[in-house]
Image (cartoon, rainbow, N blue to C red):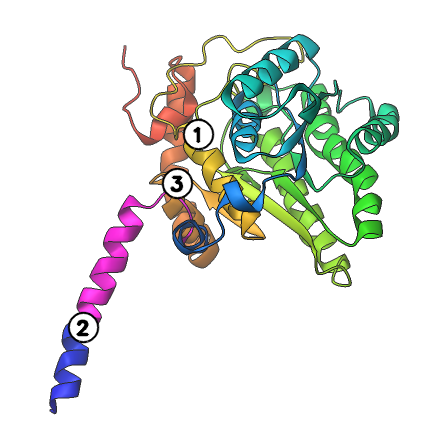
Amino acid sequence: MDWCTVLLWCFLPLYFLLHLLCFISADADFTLLWASLTGHRPEKKLRGLVVWVTGASSGIGEELAYQLARCGSRLILSARREDELKRVKHQCLERSDLQDEDILVLPLDLLARTTHEEKTKTAIQYFGHIDVLINNGGRSQRSLCMETSVDVFQALMELNFLGTVSITKQVLPHMTQRGTGSIVTVSSIVGIAGAPLSTGYSATKHALQGFFNSLRTELTDFPNILISTVLPGPVQSLIVQNAFTEQINKPVTSAGSQEHKMPTSRCVHLMLVGISNRIKEMWIGQQPFLLFFYTWQYAPTIAWIATNMLGRKRVQNFKAGLDADSAYFTKPKTA
């Protein structure tokens, strides 16, 4: 055995050990993490761009507004609650060098699809164009399938899927006419996997994955238009508090602690890195969720075994009044 072979056999274990250690501490897929280390910086790539954010009044959407403002992007902030949008705008101005005219508050109801054409025209007329659309609006679900009204499933599909598709269809012709632009849609880890208590929500995210993956293939003649989907694991936000339950107007009884989830600021930073580097699909999540992504992609049989085990704990925690996602970190309460 010559010295080159000896070195190779010594190097390979160290190489795989290094990758294993990196994976254990990783909170996004390797493509996205590599872009965060060596790719374009959001504060340079997104400066001056016009970005329309839906669901901008709280959670990921609110944090997107703050970080985009610091990057120097001009903003269109949309959600149903105009007073909350004005609050977010005020905070953006406080935290950045943007001027009042650089941020348009544009109230929007994703369910009111007949208004979407006019809202899009208003946005385009105000800034002259739209560079990036971030589809972030929507609601989650916390209820067991057998206890959930079909009306809840319909409401989820109308809001999360059809509302997003409607806005996209209004903005897309503008981008194809210009030959450039980015449409970024916030999906979820349950867009590629299943999770108990989220049957309807998961269905909407699977629908979004299918729609935008198919749309991307239709736009091969427009290489400068990015179609990107973001699949976060659990993130600290108000998504649980605002989730649908088994009945349309019944609120969540207890959202539980959110402290075990990924900080919203980290999730949004990674999203902006992905947008700046034109990444088509972003997996964002702390362990064990990142492991779920890779397992579902490359070893689905093993993924089913793990999902069934953790899914049982998720339901137990839900029935015990804990946040369902804490099943992956804590033991359920016992009587």
Closer to the chain start, of discs 3 and 1, is 1
- Between marks 3 and 2, how big is the CA–CA gap? 29 Å
Residue 330 in picture, x, y percent from top left: 28, 25
Q: Dot 2: within a 10 Å radius of its alpha carbon, few (fewer than 14), some, or many (20 or more) residues?
A: few
Is residue 5 positioned above or below 279 on the image? below
Q: Main SS type for the magenta part?
A: helix
The secondary structure type at the circle numbered 1 is helix
Mark 2 lies on residue: 11
- The image shows residue 162 at horizontal and vertical percentages of 76, 33
- At label 1, the amino acid type is Ser
Sooner in the amino-acid sequence: mark 2 or mark 1 = 2
**Magenta region: which residues?**
12-30
Residue 233 shows up from this direction: no
Instruction: Tell me what residue is drawn at x 53 percent, y 11 percent.
Output: 252
Q: Which residue is mark 1?
A: 265
Say left or right for 13 vs 311.
Answer: left
Q: Secondary structure at mark 2?
A: helix
Looking at the rendered structure, the kind of residue marked 3 is Phe
Mark 3 to mark 1 CA distance (whole Å)? 18 Å
Up-down relation of residue 240 to residue 40 (above or below)? above
Whether residue 59 appears in magenta in the rendering, the answer is: no
